[in-house]
Image: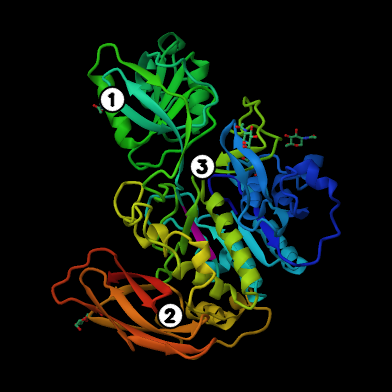
Amino acid sequence: MPIFKILLLPCILSYGMQVFHLFPYHLVSYGFPTKIRKLIGTRYFNKGYAAYAGHLNSSFQTARDSEGHGTHTLSTAAGNFVPGANVLGYGNGTAKGGSPHARAAAYKVCWPPINGSNECFDADILAAFDVAISDGVDVLSVSLGGDPAEFSEDAIAIGSFHAVAKGITVVASAGNSGPSAGTVSNVAPWLITVGASTMDRSFSIYVALGNRKHLKGASLSEKTLPAEKFYPLISAADAKIADQSEEDALLCKPGTLDPTKVKGKILVCLRGENGRVDKGHQALLAGAVGMILANDEDSGNEIIADTHVLPAAHISFTDGEAVFSYLNFTKEPMAFLSNVRTELATKPAPFMASFSSRGPNIIEESILKPDITAPGVSVIAAFTQATGPSDAEYDKRRTPFNTQSGTSMSCPHVSGVVGLLKTLHPDWSPAAIRSAIMTTATTRDNNGEPILDSTNTRATPFADGAGHVQPNRAADPGLIYDLTVNDFLNFLCNRGYSKKNIQLFSDKPYTCPKSFSLADFNYPSITVTNLNDSITVTRRVKNVGSPGTYKIHIRAPPGVTVSVAPSILKFQKLGEEKTFKVTFKLAPTAVLTDYVFGMLTWGDGKHFVRSPLAVRHY
Ligand SMILES: *[C@@H]1O[C@H](CO)[C@@H](O)[C@H](O)[C@H]1NC(C)=O
Ligand SMILES: *[C@@H]1O[C@H](CO)[C@@H](O)[C@H](O)[C@H]1NC(C)=O
Ligand SMILES: *[C@@H]1O[C@H](CO)[C@@H](O)[C@H](O)[C@H]1NC(C)=O
Ligand SMILES: *[C@@H]1O[C@H](CO)[C@@H](O)[C@H](O)[C@H]1NC(C)=O
Ligand SMILES: *[C@@H]1O[C@H](CO)[C@@H](O)[C@H](O)[C@H]1NC(C)=O
């Protein structure tokens, strides 16, 4: 299986399970920062990779993390408390993972890419799932995935089904292929699928232009320019070597920049294609004193603080347009870059990362994915010292902590929360845990406004699922939407799977039911893909809180009327279950050309049990 555009490693947490005895502790200090003191084992899986790559030398016979992804994700899920954690001096404070007292194990299944993209092989992924299950883990954090694929052809879907069938919760990244629609992957209904959003911490750098305009960018540049000193500013397109294209030069690709034009100036590069830090490296090689990295239109407001090798500011698309316009209309353009400042409680936050893969779910459109969003932009976590923070050959710096961005980083945030929930509620099923996380999520940012997309418009559930995770609320959701292993098997039956395909998932032969309605599949979100006139779906909730009377609150999607019966649910005891019906009716004059969204909330005054609604005309 090819993976997302970045290297990924699954890491797996274990709570209260036996300590592994297969791996001596020296592996821990050799391969991983000692910060992750609860790392109780590492394993590696390379037979699938070897079958393709040929002979593997000794550098492949180890779980050592040579490029940092596995260390970063694992410490986000389960890292211990570490005071004085910072990246090149920025963001200094006490770091910890989501489940700081968990014991963790790492299962390495990804290796250096061969011919571009072959790095994590299905055979190795499945072997890792099998071993993790028999090791007795409680949570699997899978920052790994390929393009969305039919479940019977998706190693993560198959491996995770076996884990979920044993009560192990599996959390997976939604992918980094956004913001295009229909890009979300890891869409099996037994997975928790996690998108990525920002947090309220910025590493800010200010750009002053000669026209007195000030712009706010993001950066983790170690080096800074002398205070208040302005330098000539040049667009990389105007700094091209004669025989290179303007497009390539504007992207600051290797070998496109003319040092005689760049020397001593601040270079403006466009985001896209080659790496963000590499653009700065090219600028530095050409003699630039600084770089302004401007977003393309798709990347919108998503600015990322990278450990640049020269003073550099990453700015939004709108701010980039202001810089280009200034360059176009100014004879001697000048600019200044400030020092980098760590800013806390920045607003608005969170908002969606543009790279986060978006719904709809193209494998099974009636299951809304992603399920949830969590922090995934400029996340500080532990890092390997086998490579520099930019993971580039030329980067000789070594940092025990690093910032990384991706749904690989948001996934272990949710895995950490799952660890805490498992401790509080050891009897909850993986579906119950997911329900608690989804129905208690927030769809508001720290301005009290709806969470925004990276384009400044309201984010839809295709970007943020049920919303941004709220761990404390997830501990006490009030009601849960549960699902059993048989529900998941029935779901596969409904896809027309043969006995043979079902056996990829089920250890025992399974007889498919005569009738099954996917509309009534007890998912915590509701998607109606073909509304014509009206449709009614059934859901079932279980009381996991105190006795209470829940009333329905409906925010109907525009052009659709939604009614719920009964509209009051009275629970007398713990574990009591009630069903209800939701009817969607197309308004007589409505013309729905695309999905419309709403929300359904059960509230007892204390708990608010929210389900996103997504409806499309047939
Ligand atoms: C990688 O691609 C090259 C050129 O297409 C090919 O010759 C080689 O066999 C490929 N390597 C593997 C391991 O498939
Ligand atoms: C092992 O093989 C890799 C890939 O071919 C190579 O980059 C590396 O230098 C080799 N290491 C050793 C120790 O031989
Ligand atoms: C980080 O904070 C700790 C505790 O306040 C302090 O001792 C340390 O010097 C700080 N490190 C940096 C790089 O600012
Ligand atoms: C600046 O000029 C370039 C080249 O003529 C043009 O492509 C670009 O759209 C202009 N940008 C702005 C913001 O004026
Ligand atoms: C939609 O509903 C109308 C009126 O009930 C019916 O005539 C039509 O055939 C339906 N279309 C589909 C695709 O089901």
Q: Is residue 71 left or right of residue 289?
A: right
Q: Earlier in the sequence, mark 1 or mark 2?
A: 1
Instruction: Please check the rendered image and state whether residue 194 is part of the magenta-colored stretch, yes or no.
Output: yes
Residue 119: give its label. Answer: none
Q: Quadrant of the N terminus?
A: bottom right
> As drawn, which residue projects farthest toward the top?
260
Please state the horizontal and vertical placement of residue 155, each as a whole percent of the image: 61, 62
Q: Residue at x 68, y 59 (%)?
A: 12
Q: Secondary structure at mark 3?
A: loop
Closer mark to the observer between disc 1 and disc 2: 1
State the image coordinates of residue 489 (x, y, percent, origin top left).
56, 80
Between the residue at mark 3 and the residue at mark 2, the CA separation in whole angstroms equals 39 Å
Per the image, the residue denoted by label 3 is 378
SS assignment at label 2? helix
Q: Is residue 244 visible?
A: no
Looking at marks 3 and 2 on the same chain, the residue that comes earlier in the sequence is marked by 3
User: Which residue lies at the image location 50% right of the left edge and 78% below the top edge?
Assistant: 491
Residue 93 magenta: no
Question: Residue 26: image x %, image y %?
Answer: 84, 46
* Residue identifier under label 1: 213
- Residue 216 visible, this orientation: yes
